[in-house]
Image: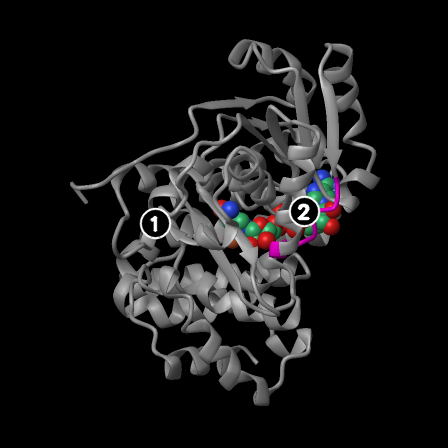
Amino acid sequence: MDTFNFSCVPNIVSAPGAAQSLASLIRQHFPQVRRVLVVTDPGFLATGLVDAPVAALENAGFAVSIYSDVRADPPEAVVIQAAEFARGCAAELVIGLGGGSSMDVAKLIAVLAGSRQELKTMYGIGNVTGDRLPLIQVPTTAGTGSEMTHISIITTGETTKMGVVAPQLFADIAVLDADLTLGLPPKATAATGIDAMVHAIEAYTNKNTKNPISDVLAYKSLSLLYTHIDAVCENGKDRSARQAMLLGSMLAGMAVASSPCAGVHALAYPVGGIFHVVHGISNALVLPEVLRFNVPAAAHQYAELAAIVAPAARGSDEAKAMSMIEELERLAARLHVETRLSQVGIKESDLDRMAEDAMLQTRLLKNNPREITQADARAIYAATL
Ligand SMILES: NC(=O)c1ccc[n+]([C@@H]2O[C@H](COP(=O)([O-])OP(=O)(O)OC[C@H]3O[C@@H](n4cnc5c(N)ncnc54)[C@H](O)[C@@H]3O)[C@@H](O)[C@H]2O)c1
Ligand SMILES: [Fe+2]
C-alpha cells in the first residue's frame, strides 16, 4: 500500500458540449499542429455526431482527415491499416472519437505513425520504444475508461486478445462530453456502464498494485456509476446523468491505469473472443461468480464497496460482500443484460476450451485477490451456464 507508482493523463476537460472546443484545446497545447486525424468507427460515424466537431475544427483552419474503419474489438490488421492511413495524410495529431475500440486504435496510430517499430514487437508491458504524435481522446461510451489508460487491447488471432501497455499510450488530453453519448442505445449503455463498474471493483481489489490513489478513484467511480446507471438506461437523454457516467468511467480508467483489472476481465475475454459477445456483456456475465469465488480473499474490500451498492447490508464482511454481489445481479436483470452464458449460445462442451483460454490472461489473473486455477475457471463458467 505504501509503495506504488501512479501516472495519469495530465489534462481532463469535462463538460457537456466540450467536443466543440477541440480547436482551442489544440491551439493551446499544440500550437504547431495543422493536420489532424480523427479516428472513429462506422457505427459512430453514422450517428452524425462526428460532423459538428469536425466542422468546428475545419472552421478553425485545421486540415481534418477521418479514419472510420475501426471495428469493435479491433483486429491487428485494422491498426496497421489505420497507421498507414495516418502516414498517408501526414497527421500531426490524433483524436480518438468513439468507444474503447476507436480510442485503443487511436493510441496505437499515434505511436506507429511516427515510428519504425512494428506492432508485433509492442505487445506486453513497456515494449514501445518510440515517441508518439500528440493524442486527444474523446469517449462516446461510458465505458472503458480507455481515455485514461496506457493500455490498448487488440484482437491478435481468431479469438485471442493482447494488450500493449506502455507509458506512451497515456493521452495528452481527455475530453468528456455527454452530448456525444445521448444516443447510445440502452443495451449498449448498460453493457458499457457495467464494464466501468467492473473496472472500479477490480481496481479496488487488485492484489498487487492497489494504492491509496486508485482506492479513492475506484470508490468515487463506483458511487457515480451505480447512482446514475439506472437513469441513463431509462432515459438516455438525461444529460447530467450521462456526464456523471462519463466522469465515473474516466475515474475507473484512471484507477485501473495503476491498479489493473483481474479475474473478471480474464474470464470475460474467452466469452468475447470465442463467442463475439461485446466486452461489457462478457464482463457482466462472469462478474457475480468471480466475485463469489473471491469472497474468501476480498470480503473486507467488497464489504467496503457494499456501502455504495448495498447500503442496507448488515452483519459480517462476508454477509455484506454477498449482499453487494446479489445487488449487482439484480442490477444486471433490471437493465436487461444477459445473466447466463447459455443466453449467448455457450454450451457445457465449450467450457474446457474457455477455461484453457482464460489461463492465457496471466497479465490479469496475477492481480486477482484469490488465485484462479483452470479448474476454478471452469467451475465459475459452469456456475454461470
Ligand atoms: N484500453 C483500455 O483501457 C480498455 C479497457 C476496457 C476495454 N477496452 C476495449 O474497448 C473495446 C470496447 O469498447 P466499447 O465498449 O466502448 O465499445 P466499442 O468502441 O467497440 O463500440 C461499440 C459500438 O457502439 C457504437 N457506439 C459508440 N459510441 C456510440 C454512441 N455515442 N452512440 C451510438 N453508438 C455508439 C459503436 O459504433 C460500436 O458499434 C474492446 O475492444 C475492449 O477490449 C479497452
Ligand atoms: Fe473492461
Indicate whether 313 appears above or below 55. Answer: below
What residue is shown with label 2?
81
Q: Secondary structure at mark 2?
A: helix
Indicate whether 345 appears above or below 57. Answer: below
Image quadrant occupied by the C terminus: bottom right
* Viewer-proximal residue among 265 and 337: 265
What residue is shown with label 1?
204
**What's the magenta region?**
68-76
For the question of whether residue 311 can be seen, the reply is no
> What residue is shown at x 17% (from left), y 41% (from top)?
3
Image quadrant occupied by the N terminus: top left
User: Furthest residue to the left?
Assistant: 2
Q: Nearer the viewer, mark 2 or mark 1?
A: 2
Amino acid carrying label 1: it is Tyr
Classified by dominant secondary structure, the portion drawn in magenta counts as loop
Point out residue 311 in the picture as x, y percentages from the top left corner. Answer: 41, 50
Circle nearer the N terminus (2, 1): 2
The local crowd at label 2, few if under 14, some if 14 to 19, many if 20 or more residues have their Cα within 10 Å, is some
Real-space Cα distance between discs 2 and 1? 37 Å
Question: What is the quadrant of residue 32 in the picture?
Answer: top right
| Ligand 1 within 8 angstroms of badge 2 C-beta | no
> What residue is shown at x 47% (from left), y 36% (from top)?
148
Point out residue 204 in the picture as x, y percentages from the top left corner. Answer: 34, 49
Residue 70 shown in magenta = yes
* Viewer-proximal residue among 266 and 71: 71
The local crowd at label 1, few if under 14, some if 14 to 19, many if 20 or more residues have their Cα within 10 Å, is many
Is 24 on the left-hand or right-hand side of 147?
A: right
> What residue is shown at x 52% (from left), y 52% (from top)?
153
* Viewer-proximal residue among 112 and 224: 112
Residue 271 shown in magenta = no
Point out residue 113 in the picture as x, y percentages from the top left corner. Answer: 57, 35
